[in-house]
Image (spheres, helix red, strand yellow):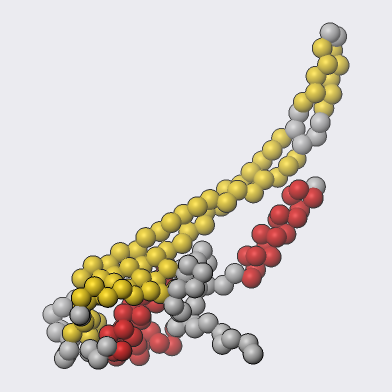
Amino acid sequence: MYRILVPALLVALLAACASPTPYQPVREGYGYSQQRIEDNRYRVVFRGNSVTPRQVVEDYMLFNAAELTLKNGYDYFEVADRHVDKSTRYVATYNDFAYPTYFHRFPYDYYGGGMYTGDYRPIARYTATANIVLYHGRKPANKVDAYDARDVVQRLGPTIRRPPPPQP
């Protein structure tokens, strides 16, 4: 009985403590990262944990691209290439519901019986990656993959959840 109860309680406790990845530089494998490719070209990545929804991962990646654009003195960015990867693993939980049986039939003794049931639960993690090009001036109206950096920061800013400040 303890073989089932203790792991189940630990999983429930960890799940209760889990929260979506905040907007932060990569920490423990989750958060944003940037790589400069050329003077005005970057690769931006945001990796979320298993409780961070896909939409949040994509928004945080765009927000990071906008912040990077403004930090470098540019006005807008164009997404040259973008994709979202989903990695899924499955966690199994088992119910150990076995009752031993003993049958005696001459000339054989038989021990057996029992039943094991299990449940598989998918755990998905999303990673959004974009190659962006930074530009000066007004964003062209006809470019659908171009974003005004100030507008992105203004619109997505209120939805950004940052990590809590460190405790003294």
Q: Is residue 109 visible?
A: yes
| Drawn side of residue 88 relative to residue 145, left or right | right
Q: Quadrant of residue 69?
A: bottom left
- Residue at figure coordinates x 75%, y 32% from the top left: 114
Q: Is residue 90 above or below residue 152?
A: above
Residue 158 vertical placement versus 98 (above, below)? below
Quarter of image, res 67: bottom left
- Residue at position x 38%, y 74% in the image: 33
Residue 93 image point, x, y percent: 64, 49
- Residue 52 visible in this rendered orientation of the protein: no
Q: Position of residue 11 (x, y in %)?
A: 66, 59
> Which image quadrant: the C terminus?
bottom right
For the point 23% across and 67% down, which residue is it? 81
Rendered residue at 63%/87% (across/down): 167
Side (left or right) of 61 relative to 2 = left
Q: Where residue 136 sits: x, y (%)?
A: 17, 89
Left or right side of 86 for 89: right
Number of dots carrying numbers: 0
Residue 148 located left or right of residue 60: left
Which quadrant of the structure image shows residue 83?
A: bottom left
Instruction: Indicate the position of residue 153 as horizontal and vertical percent values.
Output: 34, 88
**In the displayed structure, would residue 96 be above or below residue 145?**
above
The correct choice, above or below, for 126 with respect to 143 in the image is above
